[in-house]
Image (tube, rainbow, N blue to C red):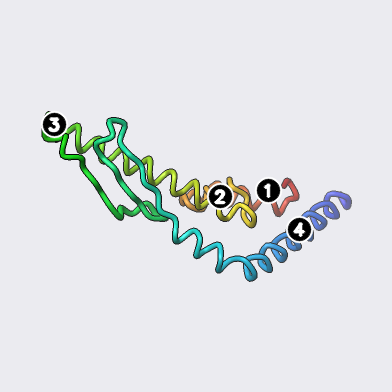
Amino acid sequence: MESDIEAHVAGLRAYTEQLRTTFLRLQDEGVELHAKAKAIQVTEKSRDGLVAVTVGARGEVIRLDIDPRVYRHPDARALADAITETIQRAAATAQERIVEVFEPLIPPDQMKAHLDGDIETVMTQLADQMGGKR
């Protein structure tokens, strides 16, 4: 029983030290990484090449270009689907780039969970770290 407590305390100490180190690195590098992440822009083209979308770091649409060739075969539903799918791919790529920017400080799976708003995974990861499982 006492060795379990000692192991738990050791895990908490290691996690505390990891948090301290991460916090100090965030102080030193965080502003620069935040600026890099905020500046991310991703442009994707639709599979048929008729739609180009540029999104920002949060997946917000910055620019939408539609090739005039879409008028040769007007299909509003297909155009809407192409725009939506292209925006989604661009937003996913932007998110991947944000994860890459913060990778030196935050494990990719943890950063992705934060970006996805997946509080259950974030809490599980924190509990695992506190328990010395990471």
Which mark, by number, is residue 12? 4
Q: Secondary structure at mark 4?
A: helix
Please state the horizontal and vertical placement of residue 55, each as a whole percent of the image.
35, 51
Please state the horizontal and vertical placement of residue 128, each as a whole percent of the image.
68, 48
Q: Are marks 2 and 4 in contact (CB under 8 Å)?
A: no
Mark 3 nearby-residue class (10 Å; few <14, some 14–19, many ≥20): few
Q: Earlier in the sequence, mark 2 or mark 4?
A: 4
Q: Amino acid at mark 1?
A: Asp
Mark 1 nearby-residue class (10 Å; few <14, some 14–19, many ≥20): some
Is residue 59 depicted above or below 27 in this figure?
above
Q: Are marks 3 and 4 in contact (CB under 8 Å)?
A: no
Alpha carbons under labels 3 and 4: distance apart: 59 Å
Alpha carbons under labels 2 and 4: distance apart: 28 Å
- Label 2, on which residue? 100
| Tag in front: 3 or 4 | 3
- Label 3, on which residue? 75
Q: Secondary structure at mark 2?
A: helix
Residue depicted at x 73% and y 59%: 18
Q: Amino acid at mark 3?
A: Asp
- Label 1, on which residue? 128
Please state the horizontal and vertical placement of residue 45, each as a whole percent of the image.
32, 39
| Tag in front: 1 or 3 | 3
Q: Is residue 29 left or right of residue 116?
A: right
